[in-house]
Amino acid sequence: MSNFTATAIAHPNIAFIKYWGVCDASLHLPENGSISMNLGALETRVTVTFDSHLEQDELEINQQVVLGERFHRISEFMDVIRKLAHKKTHARIESENKFPMAAGLASSASAFAALALAGSKAIGLELDEPSLSRLARRGSGSACRSIPAGFVEWNAGTSDRSSFGSSLAGPEHWDLVDCIALVKTTEKMLSSKEGHSLAHTSPLQASRVKDAPRRLEICRNAILQKDFDSLAVISEVDSLWMHAVMMTSIPALMYWEPATIQILKAVATARNEGLSVFATVDAGPNVHVITPKSNMNEAVAMLQSLPGVIKVIVSPAGGRAYLV
Ligand code: PMV
């Protein structure tokens, strides 16, 4: 093997039913299933080149050489790919994000989905969609949902083989948009990897996990039937329940900023006044405001009028991870 290269693009995703808490921290087997929508306007592009002259992996993110913790996480993931292919060659990895990193915009999901696809292709593996999703999951749990297209359900499973994402409906199924109200674009205080391992310390996690099949069913049906009101109610409950777990973990995790609450209240008021919008928040302070495309301009104007909002990024549903 001398020089083998591939480039892939993947979109991040926003979960309506969230993944929080792990049964197996190294395989990223989640305590509960989850459902998300890929974000077509945001993307990570990853090129992997296996080069037999390299003595170790090399990583560049947005044209900057990356070492330390982040490098080790990627290199360990490359070990998973090498093991699958029974090869030892090291690789050069170049990753480019078209959005602010590590601010709760799930950049790790799109990055590991694109890396799983480009890396497996470059090393000569031909993986089907479930296998690619399982591989992406090894990098970051939510990355398994960025492999299939559109609206994706991650079946929690009980083993490496049974835990992967599959598409419930393509991106064209429903013209929802995510209006992401950015209140902070800097690094989040605690990585979701550490957060998952604290979930069990909250007295609210067991009930959250136990009720997950019910929420998943309501969310799945709401998506299939394009029932916005049902999706709104169940997604908001799910997001708040996850944050309640975070806030009651030991030590407590408070990802919200004052502006986060300001936006949540403004979204609730707008909905009471008849606008079809709902809000969901990942492991960060930014708020994802979901609305049908027909209401997009109104929702964006409402968000931009709030003093704590730095910027609003808009995205429709996106397709699967693909090779370029
Ligand atoms: O994939 P991770 O380890 O970054 O965890 C993602 C966790 C949340 O974004 C908070 C929820 C989710 O399901 O995406």
Image: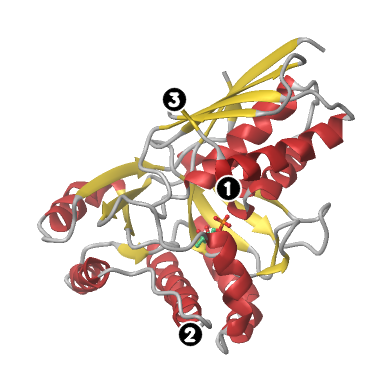
Residue labelled 1 has its Cβ within 8 Å of some atom of ligand 1: no
Marks 3/1 in contact by CB < 8 Å: the verdict is no
Q: Can you identify the residue that label 1 sits on?
A: 69
Q: Is residue 205 above or below residue 157?
A: below
How far across and down, in percent of the image, does residue 35 sit?
56, 58
Q: Which residue is drawn at 78% across and 40% down?
A: 80
Q: Are marks 1 and 2 in contact (CB under 8 Å)?
A: no
Q: What residue type is labelled 3?
A: Gln
Determine the CA span between mark 3 and mark 1: 18 Å
Q: Is residue 270 visible?
A: yes
Extreme residue toward the top, this view: 2
CB at mark 3 closer than 8 A to ligand 1? no
Q: Is mark 2 on a helix, strand or loop?
A: loop
Residue 248, label in figure: 2
Q: How crowded is mark 2: few (under 14 residues within 10 Å), some or many (20 or more)?
A: some
| Residue type at the position of mark 2 | Thr
Relative to 265, does residue 44 appear above or below in the rendering? above
Where residue 77 sits, quadrant-wise, is top right
Q: Mark 3 points at which residue?
A: 63
Query: Which of these two is toward me, 187 or 21?
Result: 187
Disc 1: CA contacts within 10 A as few (<14), some (14-19) or many (>=20): few
Q: In which quarter of the image is residue 265?
A: bottom left
Front: mark 3 or 1: 1
- Which quadrant holds the N terminus? top right
Q: What residue type is labelled 1?
A: Glu
Of circles 2 and 3, which is in front? Answer: 3
The answer for how far apart the CA atoms under marks 1 and 2 are is 27 Å
